Image (cartoon, rainbow, N blue to C red):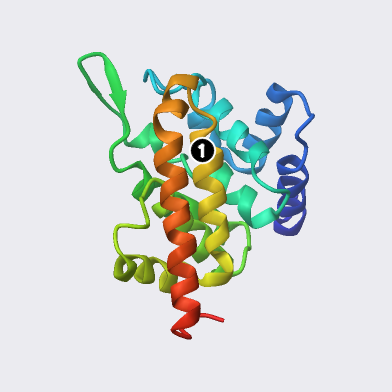
Amino acid sequence: MDKKETRERIKFLLFSDDMDIEERMQELIKCIPELEMMYHKDHNQPAHCFDIFTHTLSVVDKMPKDEIGRLCALLHDIGKPLSQTTVDGVTHYWGHPEVSCAIAYKILIRLGYFYEEARIISSICLYHDTMLDKSYEVFLGYLSYIGYRNFHYILELQKADLTSHADWYIEKKIDGLNKSHENIKEYIKRAKNEKLIY
């Protein structure tokens, strides 16, 4: 397949929520060989109830059917196998957003996505585990980098990612995430009032 055909195939697979999961995984790996390192890779972490690739597809399927958002979901944890550390029998993935960002950017450019698309998707991979509401000023930094029109992707990804964890972990974290997103909505209103975004 040429680059255009590969991109179209990836889009089809990202939108194929009802496809057999094994077949879907194998087809995605054919398009993006780097995904193979996540294939049947156990998280070895109590917060997770799926292996890394199954978790990733769960996140993909919880995103709206939008190509950019689903690419963010597909690539958000691709750096986990390269950033794992085991402490007391539990695996951690410290720094995986930075690794995922770098790998995602390289893949997207190779496949012929526009520079700006690659930058936005890789940036969302970078910040997907970040609480973006630490302060209004910090939020504005993220907003200026990701862009107002793209900011919804990171909020959707954070929700889809959290709700693809183990039930006890979702219950523990969901209120905090919802509160963070409410704060961000208020920050967006403030930025609009200050004519920083339109």
Name the kind of residue labelled 1 in the image: Asp
Vertical arrangement, residue 45 with respect to residue 155, above or below: above
Considering only vertical position in the picture, is 46 above or below 94? above
Quadrant holding the C terminus: bottom right
Q: Nearer the viewer, residue 140 or 106?
A: 140
Q: Which of 191 and 39 is in front in this view?
A: 191
Q: What element carries label 1?
A: helix
Whether residue 66 is visible here, answered yes or no, is: yes
Question: Could you tell me if residue 106 is visible in this image?
Answer: no
Tag 1: Cα neighbours inside 10 Å, few (<14), some, or many (≥20)? many
* x, y percent for residue 144: 42, 74
The residue furthest left is 88
x and y percentages locating residue 154 in the rendered image: 51, 54
Residue 103 placed where, x, y %? 45, 50
Number of marks in the image?
1
Residue plotted at (49% across, 45% down): 158
Quarter of the image where one finds residue 18: top right
Residue ID at (36%, 50%): 130
Q: Quadrant of residue 86?
A: top left
Q: Is residue 184 left or right of residue 156?
A: left
Q: In the rendered image, which residue does mark 1 sit on?
A: 161
Above or below, comparing residue 171 to residue 34 in the picture: above
Name, please, the residue furthest toward the top: 89
Q: Relative to 1, does residue 28 appear above or below in the rendering?
A: above
What residue do we see at 54% from left, 36% from top? Answer: 35
Position of residue 112 measured from the top left corner of the image (x, y, whole percent)? 63, 63
Give the residue furthest to the bottom.
195
